[in-house]
Amino acid sequence: MGIRIAVAGASGYAGGELLRLIAGHPELDLICATAHSQAGQPVAAVHPHLAGLDFRLSATDPQALATADLVFLALPHGESAAIAAQLPAGVRVVDLGADHRLLDEQAWARYYGGPHAGAWTYGLPELPGQRQKIRSSDRVAATGCYAATITLALAPLLHSGLAEPADVVVVAASGTSGAGKSPKTHLLGSEVMGDLSPYKVGAHQHVPEIKQATGAHTLSMTPVLAPMPRGILATVTAVPTSCDITEAVVREVLLDAYADEPFVHVLAEKQWPHTGATLGSNSVHLQATVDVDSGRIIVVSALDNLGKGAAGQAVQCANIMLGLPETSGLSAFGVAP
Amino acid sequence: MGIRIAVAGASGYAGGELLRLIAGHPELDLICATAHSQAGQPVAAVHPHLAGLDFRLSATDPQALATADLVFLALPHGESAAIAAQLPAGVRVVDLGADHRLLDEQAWARYYGGPHAGAWTYGLPELPGQRQKIRSSDRVAATGCYAATITLALAPLLHSGLAEPADVVVVAASGTSGAGKSPKTHLLGSEVMGDLSPYKVGAHQHVPEIKQATGAHTLSMTPVLAPMPRGILATVTAVPTSCDITEAVVREVLLDAYADEPFVHVLAEKQWPHTGATLGSNSVHLQATVDVDSGRIIVVSALDNLGKGAAGQAVQCANIMLGLPETSGLSAFGVAP
Amino acid sequence: MGIRIAVAGASGYAGGELLRLIAGHPELDLICATAHSQAGQPVAAVHPHLAGLDFRLSATDPQALATADLVFLALPHGESAAIAAQLPAGVRVVDLGADHRLLDEQAWARYYGGPHAGAWTYGLPELPGQRQKIRSSDRVAATGCYAATITLALAPLLHSGLAEPADVVVVAASGTSGAGKSPKTHLLGSEVMGDLSPYKVGAHQHVPEIKQATGAHTLSMTPVLAPMPRGILATVTAVPTSCDITEAVVREVLLDAYADEPFVHVLAEKQWPHTGATLGSNSVHLQATVDVDSGRIIVVSALDNLGKGAAGQAVQCANIMLGLPETSGLSAFGVAP
Amino acid sequence: MGIRIAVAGASGYAGGELLRLIAGHPELDLICATAHSQAGQPVAAVHPHLAGLDFRLSATDPQALATADLVFLALPHGESAAIAAQLPAGVRVVDLGADHRLLDEQAWARYYGGPHAGAWTYGLPELPGQRQKIRSSDRVAATGCYAATITLALAPLLHSGLAEPADVVVVAASGTSGAGKSPKTHLLGSEVMGDLSPYKVGAHQHVPEIKQATGAHTLSMTPVLAPMPRGILATVTAVPTSCDITEAVVREVLLDAYADEPFVHVLAEKQWPHTGATLGSNSVHLQATVDVDSGRIIVVSALDNLGKGAAGQAVQCANIMLGLPETSGLSAFGVAP
């Protein structure tokens, strides 16, 4: 008998990825997967890639969720806080949504609006000291998908004093699954194939989360929708604190920061990350250089937005919270080509 | 200490998928992965999705391969027979290439040319009686990717007498990884994206393999290159032996044929297979109906050409040959979306 | 002062392509473009690729439409007949929808349902004698997109007696714009990219239209949704009436049928059509062979479903009806790669 | 009898687009199209989208080229200078390659290497005063594709004094046709579909061209290969010279700069450019804002890398040089979806 797991929000893309990962996890047993409009549907009707699993999605019932040892919440922001408040203290919770990420109430109000639910332990184990905090927490707020991609590239630069905390400039492109499963015209295949499309230019809600996690002072982040189902590629540029900082120095800092990490790979020199290599995995790929013209440090980061950017990250946190091997049920290897 | 595995042809797409599956397999230990022009390269330089694996590809040396318990050959046709001939009897071999599939020397000459190496046990465990033969074989010829897709759709129709063995008509579209990793202009991303392109029309080399595996007498098969990296979708149509044959009858035959199979899923009524749902998995999805205008039986089949169509199939055969659980190291669930 | 043109249903994909073609047409002046929910919107808000055009979509008003010399109806089936009935006899009409295509009331009832509006002149100028009929018609029903693709491949085989009219088997794959612009989950980019997905298997509504246009007796047609915005590739197979029929004979029949056609290209020997080469054009590409195993004739046909499959076809018909050069405002050349 | 045109380098992607545009141009007559390895091939074998054109590519012979009124050179850098040197003064030349773009010999040596051919008139008519210079030039160097995209976004900011000329940061993603038609493994469809991949990070050869054209002092530009055949999306960020600069101010500067331009569209407020809307056209779409967190000005620019980024730009320049209407043979409207 394994550890009892429930998933709320199981009909969405992050929810589907959670179900896939749990089905392949040696220690976790799914006891309950809930949804709203799809409640009552066989899981394989909602997620055809899970054909062979034989249960139905149920309605979102906090009492049923409460019978689990650990609950994953994969709900739109604003919804997870309400559910979480109804779960008893003894039930561990990993929230994949934004509700419990921000410490700063004003940042919450500015970028999300509505009541601020208060912050939980931030679920990025690779940040210094964070793994320990996750281990001793019953409530963990998993990262935003852009936030994970950018923070893992940027944090070592700022923590080591290599880069100025002001004037960080990021452009990050995401596959369409990051925009969710609700049907909207601009997300139709006809619209997105063959197309790159920026959105929320100048005001993306992951900015305060990244600043909180990295200590950046000002950050310009432009998100772009890319014609692929999964993957985020972030180009993170920052001003070095000294003109002596070379590519080798930046690489050394990244290599040091992630030397013992099973899911963060600083690639071999001159090999640049690309999103396809991370598909379906929990890995992040990193590479760095210094721009010859501007002298900026450039770090490029790639991951699977549903993997290390969402469901994989959440399972990694759950493994830590439950005292399981941290890599259990997670693959470091992408499905490519 | 696990079972010692070698892979010849490890730099190609099927080879890369074998490496990924072996890395995640609880019983198999890779001792040797060989290549031609890429020999000497770190595996992660050749297969960036395997970042974190730390070995180099070696040159193709039959003596090194012979130290394994089981060798996978993922080589172009004509090359695997030559290597296989140099491996001692005690070493089990699974050939992912075409060299040992065809019983009929004339068919070999017509569709492939060159010397006929002779046939090995055909590696499609879901054919009646075939699992038993694979279990007792030291040499197994894994299926062609189209052949697997089409045979699993067609064999039950012919074995049950539902369909005429003559005048089977198939159109099957494949992702581009089926065309291999050698750079050719017509396989460039600029050419294949947004494009459907038929090839080898009227004379594909998997036709005799499918006829041999299913008992079909005549078969028209048109392959199409589709703008996606992986996946095959086959539309198989056949003339029913009686006009009383309904969709329900056809579905029943398929459900019976595959009732105990872990990797063949006859979907719920009216739910049609699509390739995306099988990505990265070893599963095949099937559905059937009877055409209202022509009365033809239509069976649609979807799988991942590198999974159940190549490397997954090969690992499944290896599991059987080695007395391991047949599903070991293989996922029934696709990575979607 | 040019010929006055109105477009009803201008917010959809076929409507947008009509606006693009009319904007580039030397003789046509758009006076009115109507929509439902998007009425009142600037055209460039609805169709960003038409940035630079400066008018708004208006509500669908038959009186406004009636002030045009020619009206294009790009409406869902069932809606165009109602509008058409309100347009005076002197106004020429090209209906891109299905309402006026079928002669057979029973076929209409079976595949579409609702009242049968009666048939207009069928808008496929390349059929024998059809150009003449279009020239003298005030009401023309443009073809379905699959119907155009398949009919142009099949009609010469049947008209020439090369192929049996029974047991025609077709598999045709279409880009997603053929499924329209209404947001639906299964049409999201996340779902369609990397995916091939059959639909309406065994009962597509273009079957009776193709039979009517070609004289086929029975036809199995399986449509597949392909991961690209535009394009249809049809693989048409038919039983030859004699076993003496070779590839050369079939090619000769196609070359004869289309010798004088500006938009139908029978490609050079062994060069197969692919959809990407027709993007944005009004051209159809054809090639043929005879299958070595089954002896079936195989004709492959490719076009742009919004071009020759819809808006281009409609403009070609309009050119004929209006006494303009038939190629006016239409390109025979695709935008590739 | 039209103006006599020759194209050298007609087998590549930019060459193919030139042939398409010339075929649809009312005043230009192609007299000669040359290639290297493809010399002797029918044009439709090399460019299937041009089926219907009936001539063969010829070998690259300066004497044949010299019989034209205007020659387009679409050759790799280093090759066009050699050809150009053999063309008599009376023959107008538009070079789509890099050989004659840079004024600065040292920048040439650093980013390209080899002998510096010297600069011609820069072929970007929308720069202040540039149209006049092009009109009176016999030799014009058309822009690089990234350079056109970024310069049109950036130049008005710097010319107006809105932005600081130092610390410009750009991330720009391009469709794969920008990487050319030579077969390379990393450009295979299997590799690029579903993938975003940065390249030449920190040192792209268009940087000095952009600095020369805009007056930027330092510029960090990171190029990314995107999974689409065509299109460039550039996110250009710059530090404002005053904290009073608002989105409205930036938009006003862009609107002023391009008020009379037929191919540059500053979109309606809040409507962001996306590449798909420019496919096949000669248009550039622009939009701007000011980042709420960092205060940086962000301008996003989209165009078709083979259109306004290469062949369209070149035809526009040729129209100006030849005294034709500047928009002749060019479309302002994209082919979408």
Image (cartoon, coloured by chain):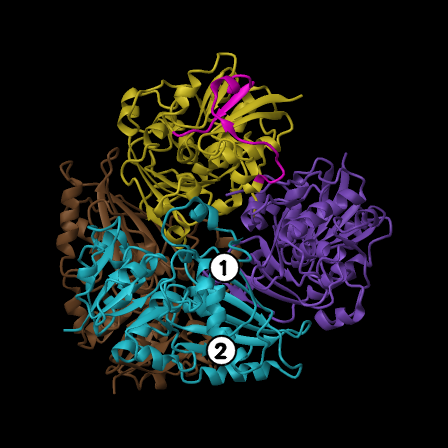
Chain colours: A purple, B yellow, C brown, D cyan
Where is mark 1, residue-wise? D204
* Nearer the observer, B27 or C29: B27
Chain label for disc 1: D
Q: Is residue C217 magenta?
A: no
Direction from residue C82 to residue C283 in the image, left or right: left
Q: Few, some or many C-alpha atoms within 10 Å of disc 2 (few <14, some 14-19, many ≥20)?
A: many
The image quadrant of residue A74 is: bottom right
For the residue marked with disc 1, what is the amino acid? Answer: His
Question: From the viewer's perspective, is the residue at label 1 or at label 2 nearer?
Answer: 1
Instruction: Indicate which disc, 1 or 2, sits on the residue closer to the N terminus.
Output: 1
Question: Can residue C85 be seen here?
Answer: no
Residue farthest along the top direction in this orientation: B89
Give the x, y percent position of residue B314: 50, 28
Where is mark 2, residue-wise? D267
* Nearer the observer, A332 or D252: D252
The image quadrant of residue D83 is: bottom left
Q: Residue at x 64, y 46 (%)?
A: A266
* Nearer the observer, D110 or B305: D110
Dot 2: element: loop
Give the x, y percent position of residue D6: 22, 64
Question: Can residue A323 be seen here?
Answer: yes
Q: Which residues are magenta?
A: B50-76
Dot 1: element: loop
The correct choice, above or below, for B122 with respect to C110 in the image is above
* Nearer the observer, C1 or A70: C1
Q: Are marks 1 and 2 on the same chain?
A: yes
Q: Is residue B60 magenta?
A: yes
For the residue marked with disc 2, what is the amino acid? Answer: Leu
Give the x, y percent position of residue C187: 49, 58
The image quadrant of residue C249 is: top left
